[in-house]
Amino acid sequence: MPKTQNKNNIAWAILSLIFLLLGEGVFSLGIYLVPLMKIVYKDWSFFVVLGIGLLASLMTGSSIGLISILLIVYLLLIRILSGVFRDNLLILGFLAVVFNFVIDKVTGSWWNILESVLVFVLVLTMGMAAGFDHDLRLRG
C-alpha cells in the first residue's frame, strides 16, 4: 500500500516558516498565521505549530511556549469554525486578525491597522488560491 504526501502540505508548512522569518524577523509582522490555516486538518499540524511558536517566541523575546499555546488554540478554533461555517474566508480572516492582535499584545509587539489589513488580505488571497493538488507516491 503506497503512502501519499500532498505537495501542498509541505509547501504550506515551508511558506509558514518563511513568513515567520520574514514577518517577525525582518518586518515585525505576524503574517505567519495565514499559511497555518491550510494545514489545519493534518495529523502533524500541531507539531509544526509548536515549532513555529517556539521559533516565534525566540524571535520576539517572549516567554518560551506562550506563542505556541496561542497558536494551538488558534488552530483548534480554525478546525471548529471551518467545520461550522464551511470555510467562510471572511470569518477565518477575522479570526486571524484577532489572533494576530492577541499575539502582538501578549508579546508586547507593536500593532497597527495596516498589519491587520495585510493579514486579512493574505487570508482571502491564499484561501482563494487554487493550489496544486498533486500527490507524491512514496514506495517503502
Image (cartoon, rainbow, N blue to C red):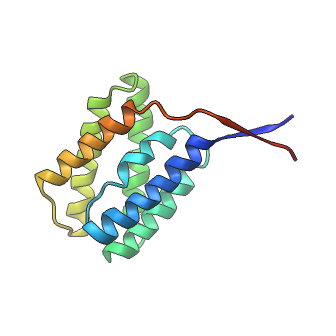
- Residue 41 at x, y percent in the picture: 54, 37
Depth check, front residue: 82 or 11:
11
Instruction: For residue 116, say whether it is visible.
Output: yes
Quarter of the image where one finds residue 16: bottom left
Depicted 67 relative to depicted 6: above or below: below
Depth check, front residue: 3 or 15:
15
Depth check, front residue: 11 or 56:
11
Quarter of the image where one finds residue 24: bottom left
Quarter of the image where one finds residue 57: bottom left
Residue at image point 21% right, 54% down:
101
- Residue 110 at x, y percent in the picture: 16, 66
Counting every numbered tag in the picture gives 0
Q: Specify whether 112 is left or right of 109.
A: left
Residue at image point 36% right, 47% down:
34
Residue at image point 87% right, 34% down:
1
- Residue 59 at x, y percent in the picture: 36, 74
- Residue 70 at x, y percent in the picture: 36, 55
Depicted 54 relative to depicted 95: above or below: below
Residue at image point 44% right, 69% down:
55
Instruction: For residue 62, say whether it is visible.
Output: no
Farthest-out residue, left: 113
Depth check, front residue: 75 or 93:
93
